[in-house]
Amino acid sequence: MLKCLDFNRPDRWNPRHWWCGETTLARAIYNRNRHSFGASRFIENVRKESNSELVHLQKQLIQDICKDKDKVEIKTQSPATQKIKKIIGLKSVLLVLDDVDDKKQLAALTGDISWFAPGSRIIITTRQVGVLGLAGLQEEAI
């Protein structure tokens, strides 16, 4: 699995790094590799956490990418998405989204893979592979 992720090749983006898997495996990969990235975030239970508000998850992501200890003052989803778009390409990011069940969650937290800096990796766990297809990922990338 680690060979598939190709962590030693920060010079290119390979969309095959989107896949479905187990939370335990994703956590192990995250813990082993997070220090190799400019920023990292493991967002657990996206399905459950996003029932209240996606903005809360977006704020956490922004704070981790910016390594900002201060509270991010964003109240709605659209400005948060724009802020993520603006900062996510500044450094390589290891992002794990655990238990995704809606394409809106992917849109709010990752936007488009073209936003990410070279060398970034995104790992998604889901019980519904169809969500990845609905998010516009090509079948060979899943």
Image (cartoon, helix red, strand yellow):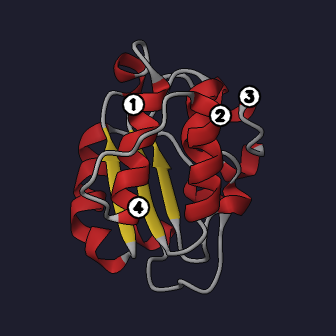
- In the image as oriented, which residue stretches furthest toward the top? 51
Residue 41 at x, y percent in the picture: 34, 54
The N terminus: image quadrant: bottom left
Q: Earlier in the sequence, mark 2 or mark 4?
A: 4
Q: Earlier in the sequence, mark 3 or mark 1?
A: 1
Q: Earlier in the sequence, mark 3 or mark 4?
A: 4
Mark 3 Cα within 10 Å, few/some/many (few <14, many 20+)? few
Disc 2 to disc 3, C-alpha distance: 20 Å
In this view, the mark in front (2 or 3) = 2
In this view, the mark in front (2 or 4) = 2
Residue 70 at x, y percent in the picture: 27, 53
Confirm or deny contact between disc 2 and disc 1 (CB under 8 A): no
Pointer 3 residue: 134
Disc 4 to disc 1, C-alpha distance: 14 Å
Residue type, mark 1 in image: His
Give the number of the disc on residue 65. 4
